[in-house]
Image: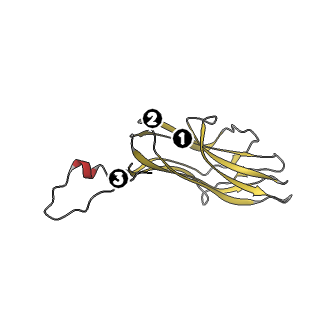
Amino acid sequence: MAINPNTDFSVSGVYTANQANRFPRGVMALATSTTSYTLTTSGTAAIATGMTVTFTAVANRYYRITYYEPQAQTPTVVGNAQSYLKQTSASGTIIGNAVLTNETATTDQSPLTIIKTMTFTAGTVVLVGTGSVSSITGAPSFIRDATREALLLVEDIGPA
């Protein structure tokens, strides 16, 4: 990754637009959900409840994307639960994934987090969070409530 850091500022210096454009622009998109989502076995699983964001990307800028599921629950057999961060749609390009592997025949639970830093071409970008499980034994799901909120966050962190 190429980095284009800002310069040091001085009291009598001239502050330019070029310098201002090197600052991070902050939150570009945010989706949250407190509604649980039942996992499926499909590789192109449906979008997890509430996990879609749309923003306008600027070329040559870095974006940090965080997809957080507060509690993933595996099936009650040996298997796994996965969260995916995808571009465009539930069947779109996989940007990242997180896996909770269960090596016993009991339910296992853990948070899943995906953090990705990347650039996009200029224009509208749609990102979605999906989930799937290797087996539908038991009730595999992403568990959410008022104190366990899922989120999909996009932050502009500066120029490339």
Quarter of the view holding residue 71: bottom right
Q: Helix or strand or loop: what does disc 1 sit on?
A: strand
Q: Which mark is residue 127?
A: 1
Residue type, mark 2 in image:
Thr
SS at mark 3 in the image: loop
Q: Residue at x 60, y 35 (%)?
A: 92
Which residue bears the numbered disc 3?
4
- Write down the quadrant of residue 72 in the picture: bottom right
Question: Residue 76 placed where, x, y %?
Answer: 83, 54
Tell me the number on the disc at residue 124: 2
Q: Closest to the observer: 33 or 18?
A: 18
Residue 144 in the image, given as x and y percentages of width and height: 65, 54
Residue in view at x 32 percent, y 54 percent? 23
For label 3, the crowd category at 10 Å Cα-Cα, with few meaning under 14, some 14 to 19 and many 20 or more, is few
Q: Residue at x 78, y 46 (%)?
A: 134
Q: CA distance from mark 1 to mark 3?
A: 26 Å
Foreground pick, 160 / 73: 160
Neighbours of disc 2 within 10 Å: few (<14), some (14-19), many (20+): few
Q: Nearer the viewer, mark 2 or mark 3?
A: 3
Figure colour scheme = secondary structure
